[in-house]
Amino acid sequence: MTKIIEIKSRQVFDSRGFPTVQSNVKLEDGSIGTSIVPSGASTGSYEACELRDENSKYLNKSVFNAVENVNNLINNHLKGKDSLDQENIDELLINLDGTDNKSKLGANSILSVSIANCKAAAQSQKKEIFEYLSKDKKYKLPFPLMNIVNGGAHANNSLNIQEFMIRPDGANSFEECMQIAFLTIQNLKKILEANKMNTSVGDEGGFAPNLNSDEEAIDLILESINKSGFKPGKDVTLCLDVASNELYDGKNYSIITNKKISSGELIDYYSSLTNKYPIKSIEDPIFEDDWSSWSSLTKRLGEKVQIVGDDLFVTNHKRLDRGIEEKSANAILIKLNQIGTVSETLKTIYLAQDNNFNTIISHRSGDTEDTFISDLAVATKSNQIKTGSLSRSERVSKYNRLLNIEEILKNPGMSAI
Ligand code: 2PG
Ligand code: MG
């Protein structure tokens, strides 16, 4: 009864209004799983391939070939296979593609089917997705790394750092995390308004004002934390995603306004920044190929700061293996579409956790109403999730799902549906 009978895909749109792939997997017992894949703007070079058409109708962004691949090749190949064997389904997809970076069928087509299959299987077992995905039926709600100010490739403003985030470390429940983040964000809005600054938001829902420097953004966020009655560094800490690939010109980094600095100077800069401010996490501080500077930074700051590899690891267990060996970081950002299947993503998460790396489940800057990552975070007991600000429904939907899960876990036997 859990055999796949049909897989169907179509082109839909993500939060930037760009085309993306939506797929349904239907099982013999009538269960249906649906998934829509996200898409990044500041992508790492080692990510799995996102297949887009060369077609001027959609400015080379359409995904009709990826959709065709699902409807024909993938549908024919997976029909009749048992949906409950996720590893086998993913292996069949990987082998059907046959390339290292999923460039034949496209990681977007493959991932949409992989996730939709997992959801259909959970439905057939009458389980919540997080329950179905869990190895040991033990769960944990993650702390949100909540975006509050957008810069870099995610906003049309003057800020170099891509994401300024707050983490409500003092909270005792997910609901309390949301309350702390809500107050801080609303107070920042008031502060920006009082300073006659722009309160429109960037791709991930954080404010995107034009400021004189990145440090000014940090000062304003600290002001909003204090105004909300919280203690910076205790109740609320700061987290950054530098997305430094975007700031690197092959030699130097442009992170400080009107100045170019070397990797050594950059490490000194992070050291002074984390001494001055309650910054507890820095993602992609160094560009993706400079492994030795990653190790130097982790050696210098890793005891007190979470050093997160996103573009460095691209959710790929082979790159993570090297990072573990070389002590390049102490945390990994997990994005399903960087690698392309649920099984490979789980493998990377558990490899990281077995080696004492924190795992942070993440959205993409172009995201959708799909909330699978919320379930993934809870199922894998990842202690953090990064899924944007408290605005824009493609971001808020993930938080809402986590609130639902928190309620389900408090009331065993109840269902959010
Ligand atoms: C990142 C992500 C998500 P993008 O760099 O961590 O915030 O951005 O999806 O554009 O790669
Ligand atoms: Mg990143």
Image: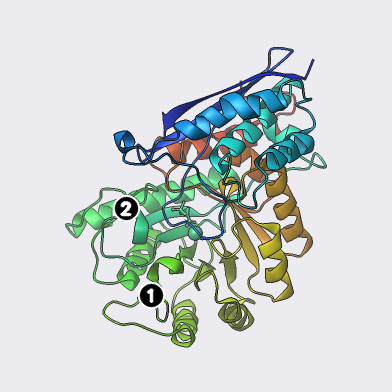
Residue 396: where, in percent of width, then height?
Answer: 46, 38
Q: Residues within 10 Å of mark 2 (few under 14, many from 20)?
A: many
Residue that appears at 47% across and 45% down: 39
Check the image and report above or below for 370 versus 317: above
Residue 362: where, in percent of width, then height?
Answer: 55, 50
Tell me which amino acid carries mark 1: Asp
**Mark 1 or 2, which is nearer the eye?**
1
Name the residue carrying label 1: 249
Tell me which amino acid carries mark 2: Phe
Q: Earlier in the sequence, mark 1 or mark 2?
A: 2
Residue 127: where, in percent of width, then height?
Answer: 73, 26
Toward the left, the furthest residue is 196
Quadrant containing the C terminus in the rendered view: top right
Name the residue carrying label 2: 207
Q: Is residue 382 visible?
A: yes
Q: Is residue 415 visible?
A: no
Location of residue 42 (image quadrant): bottom left
Find numbered disc 2 in the image and state the secondary structure of the residue it sits on: loop
Q: Nearer the viewer, residue 65 or 212?
A: 65
Residue that appears at 55% across and 41% down: 106
Quadrant containing the N terminus in the rendered view: top right
Location of residue 331 (image quadrant): bottom right
Label number found at residue 201: none
Check the image and report above or below for 71 versus 244: above
Check the image and report above or below for 98 versus 286: above
Measure the alpha-carbon separation of dots 1 and 2. Answer: 27 Å
Q: Are marks 1 and 2 in contact (CB under 8 Å)?
A: no
Check the image and report above or below for 89 versus 206: above
